[in-house]
Amino acid sequence: MSSTGDGIGKAQEPGITPPVFFVVLLILGSLVVAGLAATLAVVLFGVDQTDPSFGLIGNLTATLCLVFLLWRFGWLEAAGIASWGGWRAWTAALVLLVYYLLELT
């Protein structure tokens, strides 16, 4: 694999060349990370497997690993997610947050 010269290194090329294969690897990797983190929570913290925090710990860990991977590939900046956004984006986020909080009560 050769570098294209626009800052894309060899570690990033597998994500660009076969996109479907790469997405399947990301999904399987996130499932493995979530499973390992949830199992580790059971072993270390004594969390019961029927407790909702069992799945929450695994999902949060997998999500953080995925966001870290996207950040390392530079995809967050390319998608515009790393910027603060305009007032419309914050208004939409605030409306959704209020709706979510009202649904919880």
Image (tube, helix red, strand yellow):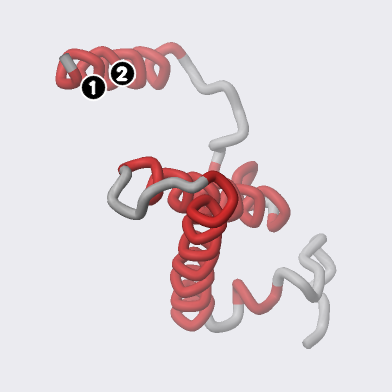
Q: Is residue 102 above or below residue 54?
A: above
- Residue positioned 37% across, 16% down in the render: 88
Residue sitting at x 81%, y 69%: 9
Near-viewer residue (99 or 79): 99
Mark 1 and mark 2 in contact (Cβ < 8 Å)? yes
Q: Residue at x 60, y 28 (%)?
A: 83
Image mark count: 2
Task: Return the residue at label 1.
Answer: 100
Q: Position of residue 70 (x, y in %)?
A: 61, 53
Q: Quadrant of the C terminus?
A: top left
Disc number at residue 74? none
SS type, badge 2: helix
Residue 28 lies left or right of residue 9; in this view the side is left
Q: The N terminus lies in which quarter of the figure? A: bottom right
Q: What residue would you read off at disc 2? A: 97
Decide which of 29, 77 is in the foreground and name it.
29
